[in-house]
Image (tube, coloured by chain):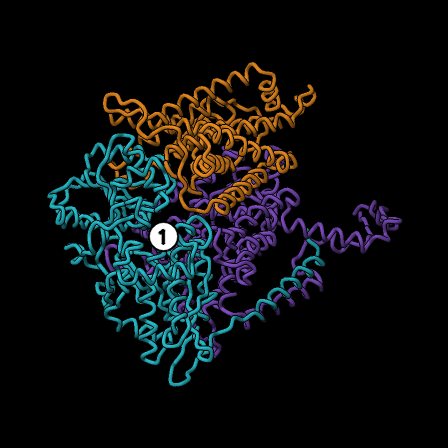
């Protein structure tokens, strides 16, 4: 028996969503790529620094979104997982110590320590995951908060790995004798450190974003969202809560660990105090401002929270060091706090929410003539194919 | 022995301050299911205003305290009215974040108005006032802290048990819709909750400031320790907040006092995380805290 | 699910932004030579200006107490220099960036200004300065560090400009044992649980060995602690008579006040950052503090018997009239003598490139600090890159302009002289 359905949107309705389904998205990709190439070739080092930090922040924001945005597990502890990743990378990739006072390092390649950072952080996430099964909402949030403080205590007291309160240096990614923090030549073309880091961070972000995006469109992603929206309902429907929450924790911690390793590597010297509550809250602000449960939202949120203040500073819209505490830094912090409040009040979907609202508005205006009457009714032919009753 | 008692006493006093902050959290949570992350900065603002009132405007201590109370209550009420009112029904995460936003705004405002240099703390006592017995000094500030906390607890107990508004608040905490149906004005209840909470925060802040002699903008971060306190005691229990606060305070100070003896094993600074360790332990064993009510979840 | 049209719009917008960004390339200072002078980035031979960088917190909790006064000191010094012919005719300008005491922001701001400055004249904070260490090394950029961490001497391009914290502790106990003649005193230390505190602790341990101190207590506190009863009670129970305090001002207030409350009054010796003149505004603390000592360096503010002081006071009145007497201002002002000496030497060598400055720095030997600080000496090995090992012990004195009055002249203790870096 066959059913023929004719409708205007048959093609997009019936097929699974594809990232590059039609001409306009290929065009968008092409233009985006062109813009990136132009930026890559002509921008100066200082812009690269701002953009590179934003890229790393975007990875961590993605991590937090996986856990809190998609799966609804409140977490204030992302800086703890970032730290785990960072110290793993330091242990594996750091320069071997020349004196007993220096922290440990094995000098391995970044191709080892970047994934390892993620894996070790994921393992720790797997350990913490079961607590999420027993705690909800605010309680989970406070436990993750406790993680940050416990983490700081631990890091200060294991100087062999973390350098103790003095801190330590972190490894620089390198291809053999060519570290990324120096100008290198490849096939006759010179690459500045900013460009090399940009390629590395951009590639990792791209892979992470595609991966997360795909996961979230799959069955697992729907399970995550179900857990967020109504846990009991999800369990009733057959979602394995344990698997879903553990999966969210593991994926989130994996990405957070990698982001932490990259952060530490790019800053090059970090003390244990760096991985504090303030850092975690910045990422929470990023997912809220950008839009929870959205890959693009994560990237935009990171750009807003980590990139925009620096861009404002760059153009010196406000004087740096005026007396009387009305400095640009203080004003930035004030605006940052106010933005959080304003976004949450009026647009809880963050920037992505704003964009979607904008979209709807545009759609309303461009289709307004269709409000006068609906689309013509569709003919659905339910009649059976001739011969169906004929049994073989 | 005197050493132990001295530490225990200081722990009780510190615990009372945590209890006051925790009470503030608890009251707001009981009334509106909101966790107010900005409690620490309300404390900060209160302490700074009292300080300024005493040292710059030369008011005596009690009027200055009153001024601080009024100011923080107004901030709390304004925030509740203008911001939180619109957030009813939103997910817990969003509400948590919006109070974090307030936290950031308040702290930056304090830095912008007063600068970040240390500011003297206003105190009605001289340093050495108090009793000394058996090698243990019972400072006036600590004694007053304990006394005022006890008094406030008694007052709140009476308030919640026997007064109209207290009962109304408990009713709202149980079931908002039913309370509305019975004719309770939820808006007044929320305002009351935030007002009381802000006032208690300021009192706690002033005692903490007296203990510290000088305050700076990072002063409000102490409020975070109140979270373990209320989780230990039970987030919706007034007596729980007090017991939780005192237990956490005593254990923290005792740990700080003895930790150098085990510094070889435990390293430095374990007293900073003992409250959180206790909290995690409690959550594993008795998730609703010592005095909290077990919640039946409605599907 | 987001539509393609939206994606298209978003990507176009992002593309536009990226294009704009790439168009905003920052300008390099003109390099090249003229009149035989080789010039590096940040030098404009035509207008005869040299641009230096300042990376300091201008907002946040560290700005008002330390960041802003120190930067003001540096600027005041060069305002004076510029008004009097500059450095061999070159005027010195500053690019100031707010780091908010964050290592990440310091790295960002450094990358923002590094092609426009010849040298970093002021980089505040240990974690922050170390964050730009590798960048400065690859840029061959000298960084004058506004922090007294001992680790600086082992880094090629970082300049330590005063007596490190570690040696401050040792000098303090040299005073107690050698100058006051107290043998085997019962001593203790209370230190902050971070890199700063660790420095103080290292110095304390060296002092114990060198001066045969009777160490009875080593107590630490966390940055977020507000109650110090436990730590003070420990010190009291241990019976320490001389307690070194490696802390920050509001903590110092808590420690000394709580101690007095408990009836414990040892001789407090404060590390230089542990004291701030604002503490004297706390009425309860004023009588207590006046018995405490501070270890630091430099002439007392307003002491016009010291050669450079009159000039500094004049400069304060002229360029920063709102500046209250402040040890960090004086530090920034005095440390700029070293920057000046480097620039002058480099100009004498007709080479104001980054490498030229480095060579000049290497060959500096002794620099006069105008009397505000004792002359400093630089060499090439880590031990020699400690410019000064001396300290002054001050009494806290509410009547003195900056709150402290020298008890001793500048001296270097035996342990400090022998300490290996």
Picture coordinates of residue A113 (x, y %)? 40, 57
SS at circle 1? loop
Q: Is residue C185 above or below residue B5?
A: below
Side (left or right) of B117 relative to B299: left
Residue B293 picture location, percent across and down: 52, 22
Quarter of the image that includes the C terminus of chain C? bottom left
Colour purple, chain: A
Look at the image and give the colour of chain B: orange
Q: Nearer the viewer, residue C133 or C410?
A: C410
Q: Residue A387: where, in percent of width, then height?
A: 84, 49
Give the letter of the cyan chain: C
Toward which corner of the image does residue C383 lie, by quadrant? bottom left
Residue A210 is left or right of residue A274, and the answer is: right
Q: Quadrant of residue C23?
A: bottom right
In the displayed structure, would residue C407 be above or below residue B9? below
Q: How many numbered marks appear?
A: 1
Residue at the top extreme, as displayed = B162
Q: Chain of mark 1?
A: C
Left or right relative to A244: residue C346:
left
Residue A261 seen anywhere in this rendered image of the structure: no
What is the crowding at mark 1: few (fewer than 14 residues within 10 Å), some, or many (at least 20)? some
Residue A65 seen by the camera: yes
Q: Which residue is mark 1?
A: C325
Q: Residue at x 52, y 44 (%)?
A: B109
| Residue B289 screen position, x and y as percent | 46, 25
Question: Residue B277: which quarter of the image?
Answer: top left
Q: Is residue A198 left or right of residue B247?
A: right
Q: Nearer the viewer, residue B256 or C245?
A: C245
Front-lying residue, C89 or C244: C89
Q: Which residue is located at x 26 percent, y 52 percent?
A: C296
């Amino acid at each position: 028996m066959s059913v023929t359905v004719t409708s205007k949107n048959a093609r997009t309705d019936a097929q699974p969503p594809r990232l590059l389904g039609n001409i306009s998205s290929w065009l968008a990709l092409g233009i985006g790529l062109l813009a990136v190439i132009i930026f890559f070739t002509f921008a100066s080092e200082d812009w690269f620094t701002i953009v590179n930090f934003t890229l790393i922040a975007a990875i961590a924001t993605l991590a937090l979104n996986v856990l809190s945005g998609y799966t609804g597990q409140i977490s204030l502890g992302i800086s703890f997982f970032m730290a785990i990743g960072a110290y793993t990378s330091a242990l594996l990739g750091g320069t071997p110590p020349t004196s007993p006072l220096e922290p440990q390092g094995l000098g391995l390649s970044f191709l080892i320590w970047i994934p390892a950072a993620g894996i070790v952080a994921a393992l720790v996430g797997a350990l913490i995951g079961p607590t999420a099964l027993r705690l909800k909402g605010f309680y989970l949030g406070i436990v993750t908060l406790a993680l940050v403080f416990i983490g700081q205590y631990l890091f200060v007291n294991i100087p062999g790995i973390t350098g103790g309160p003095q801190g330590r240096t972190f490894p620089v990614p390198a291809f053999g004798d060519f570290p990324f923090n120096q100008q290198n030549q490849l096939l006759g073309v010179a690459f500045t450190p900013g460009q090399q880091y940009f390629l590395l961070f951009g590639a990792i972000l791209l892979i992470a974003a595609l991966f997360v995006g795909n996961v979230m469109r799959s069955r697992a992603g729907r399970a995550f969202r179900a857990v967020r929206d109504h846990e009991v309902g999800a369990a009733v429907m057959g979602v394995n809560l344990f698997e879903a929450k553990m999966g969210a924790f593991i994926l989130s911690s994996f990405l957070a660990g990698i982001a932490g390793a990259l952060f530490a590597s790019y800053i090059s010297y970090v003390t244990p105090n760096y991985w504090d509550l303030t850092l975690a809250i910045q990422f929470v602000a990023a997912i809220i401002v950008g839009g929870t449960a959205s890959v693009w939202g994560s990237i935009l949120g990171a750009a807003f929270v980590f990139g925009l203040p620096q861009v404002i500073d760059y153009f010196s819209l406000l004087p740096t060091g005026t007396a009387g505490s009305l400095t640009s830094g203080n004003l930035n912090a004030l605006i940052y706090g106010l933005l959080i409040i304003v976004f949450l009040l009026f647009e809880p979907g963050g920037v992505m929410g704003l964009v979607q609202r904008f979209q709807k508005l545009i759609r309303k205006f461009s289709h307004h003539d269709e409000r006068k009457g609906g689309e013509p009714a569709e003919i659905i032919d339910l009649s059976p194919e001739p011969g169906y009753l004929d049994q073989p | 022995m005197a050493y132990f008692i001295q530490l225990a006493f200081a722990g009780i006093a510190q615990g009372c301050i945590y209890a006051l902050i925790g009470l503030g959290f608890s009251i707001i949570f009981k009334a509106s299911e909101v966790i107010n992350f900005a409690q620490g900065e309300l404390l900060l603002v209160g302490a700074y205003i009292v300080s300024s009132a005493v040292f710059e405007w030369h008011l005596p201590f009690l009027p200055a305290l009153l001024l601080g109370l009024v100011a923080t209550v107004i901030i709390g009420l304004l925030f509740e009215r203008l911001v939180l009112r619109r957030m009813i029904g939103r997910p817990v995460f969003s509400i948590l974040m919006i109070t974090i936003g307030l936290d950031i705004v308040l702290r930056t405002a304090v830095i912008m108005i007063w600068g970040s240099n240390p500011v003297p703390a206003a105190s009605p006592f001289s340093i050495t006032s108090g009793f000394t017995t058996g090698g243990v000094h019972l400072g006036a500030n600590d004694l007053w802290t304990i006394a005022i906390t006890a008094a406030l607890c008694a007052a709140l107990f009476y308030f919640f048990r026997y007064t109209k508004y207290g009962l109304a608040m408990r009713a709202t905490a149980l079931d908002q819709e039913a309370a509305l149906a019975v004719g309770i004005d939820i808006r007044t209840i929320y305002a009351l909750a935030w007002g009381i909470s802000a006032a208690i925060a300021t009192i706690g802040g002033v005692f903490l400031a007296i203990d510290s002699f000088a305050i700076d903008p990072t002063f409000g971060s102490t409020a975070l320790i109140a979270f373990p306190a209320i989780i230990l005691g039970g987030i919706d229990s007034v007596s729980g907040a007090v017991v939780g606060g005192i237990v956490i305070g005593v254990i923290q100070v005792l740990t700080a006092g003895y930790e150098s003896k085990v510094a070889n094993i435990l390293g430095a600074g374990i007293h900073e995380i003992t409250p959180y360790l206790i909290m995690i332990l409690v959550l594993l064993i008795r998730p609703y805290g010592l005095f909290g009510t077990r919640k039946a979840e409605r599907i | 699910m987001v539509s393609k049209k939206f994606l298209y719009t978003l990507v176009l917008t992002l593309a536009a932004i990226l294009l704009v960004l790439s168009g905003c390339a920052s300008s390099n200072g003109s390099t090249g030579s003229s009149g035989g002078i080789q010039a590096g980035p940040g030098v404009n031979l035509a207008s005869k200006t040299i641009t230096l960088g300042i990376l300091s917190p201008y907002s946040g909790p560290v700005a008002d107490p330390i960041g802003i006064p120190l930067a003001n000191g540096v600027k005041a010094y060069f305002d004076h220099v510029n008004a009097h012919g500059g450095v061999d005719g070159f005027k010195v300008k500053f690019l100031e960036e707010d780091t908010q005491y964050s290592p990440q922001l310091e790295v960002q701001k450094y990358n923002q200004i590094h092609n426009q400055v010849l040298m970093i004249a002021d980089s505040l904070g240990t974690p922050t300065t170390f964050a730009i260490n590798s960048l400065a090394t690859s840029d061959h950029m000298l960084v004058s560090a506004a922090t007294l961490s001992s680790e600086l001497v082992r880094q090629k391009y970082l300049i330590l400009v005063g007596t490190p914290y570690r040696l401050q502790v040792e000098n303090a106990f040299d005073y107690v044992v050698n100058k006051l003649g107290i043998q085997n005193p019962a001593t203790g230390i209370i230190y902050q649980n971070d890199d700063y505190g660790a420095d103080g602790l290292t110095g304390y341990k060296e002092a114990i060995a060198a001066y045969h101190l009777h160490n009875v207590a080593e107590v630490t506190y966390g940055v977020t602690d507000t109650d110090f009863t436990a730590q003070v009670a420990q010190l009291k129970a241990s019976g320490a008579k001389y307690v070194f305090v490696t802390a920050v001002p509001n903590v110092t207030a808590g420690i000394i006040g709580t101690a007095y409350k408990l009836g414990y009054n040892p001789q407090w010796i404060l590390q230089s950052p542990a004291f701030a003149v604002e503490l004297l505004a706390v009425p309860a603390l004023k009588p207590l503090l006046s018995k405490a000592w501070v270890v630091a360096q430099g002439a007392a503010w307003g002491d016009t018997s010291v050669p450079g002081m009159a000039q500094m006071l004049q400069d304060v009145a002229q360029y920063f009239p709102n500046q209250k007497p402040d040890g960090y201002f004086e530090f920034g002002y005095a440390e700029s003598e070293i920057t000046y000496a480097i620039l002058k030497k480099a100009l004498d060598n007709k080479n104001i490139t980054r490498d030229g400055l480095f060579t000049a720095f290497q060959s500096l030997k002794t620099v006069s600090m105008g009397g505000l600080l004792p002359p400093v000496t630089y060499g090439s090995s880590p031990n020699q890159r400690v410019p000064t090992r001396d300290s002054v012990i001050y009494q806290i004195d509410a009547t003195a302009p900056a709150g402290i009055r020298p008890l001793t002249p500048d001296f270097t203790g035996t342990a400090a002289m022998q300490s290996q870096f």
